[in-house]
Image (cartoon, rainbow, N blue to C red):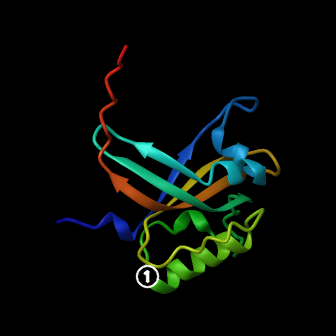
Amino acid sequence: MTISLTFLHHFIRYYRIKQGFCLNLYYKDVRFWQENPTFSFDTLDKRQQFEVFAVLESRVQAEKESSFRYYEQCGVLTAPAHAELMSWLIDHSLYDTGVVPRYGNHIVILSTCSYHTADGRFLVAAQKVHDGPVKDPQPETH
């Protein structure tokens, strides 16, 4: 069975040392986003480029809390679930990027620990804007 990735929402969770390097934290600064509105993921045969649409701080909710749990919204979403997730991400973004993903776009959310609160998370949400082969590097000419 083949599932089109264009309808999937993915979360990429990674860890960092408290004082360590973490690229997505640079997105807290709107100037960094203005200079880097896109990022790419490369595999051996594919380059995927993503456009950032929301940057925010959040936290993992306690079991008894009834708040929205963005981290439970992954995989193939219905149109209403997609709309709810996009609204939540954009409404909580640290700044307005002017980008609003449409239903059907491939979404990725980078998530890492954040120390602004207990169980804090820092999120960078982006939509896929390009998917193509990785180009071989050009041979050096002397």
Picture layout, residue 18 above or below residue 42: above
Question: Tag 1, which secondary structure?
Answer: loop
- Front-lying residue, 12 or 27: 27
Please tell me which residue is depicted at 63% across the width and 49% down the height of the picture.
36
**The N terminus - image quarter:** bottom left
**Residue on which the image places disc 1:** 78
Q: Which residue is drawn at 41% across and 58% down?
A: 130
Q: Left or right? Give the position of 90 relative to 101.
A: right
The residue lying toward the viewer, choosing from 63 and 73, is: 73
Q: Which residue lies furthest to the bottom in this view?
A: 80
Give the residue furthest to the front. 142
> Which residue sits at x=66%, y=65%?
63
Looking at the picture, tell me which residue is in the foreground, 59 or 32.
32
Can you give x and y, in whole percent of width and height, for residue 40 in the image?
Answer: 48, 47
Q: Quadrant of the C terminus?
A: top left
Left or right: where 79 falls relative to 114: left
Residue 45 in percent (x, y) is at 28, 41
Examine the image and state in which quarter residue 84 appears.
bottom right
- Residue 83 higher or lower than 30, as above or below: below
User: Residue 115: which quarter of the image?
Assistant: top right
Please, is residue 57 above or below residue 76 in the view? Answer: above
The amino acid pointed to by label 1 is Thr
Query: Is residue 63 shown left or right of residue 71?
Result: right
Farthest residue to the top: give it. Answer: 142
Number of numbered discs visible in the structure rendering: 1
Q: Nearer the viewer, residue 58 or 128?
A: 128
Query: Hey, which quadrant is residue 65 in on the image?
Result: bottom right
Residue 21: percent from the left, percent from the top?
68, 31
For disc 1, the neighbor class at 10 Å (few under 14, some 14 to 19, many from 20) is: few
Residue reaching furthest left? 1
**Residue 62 screen position, x and y as percent:** 70, 63
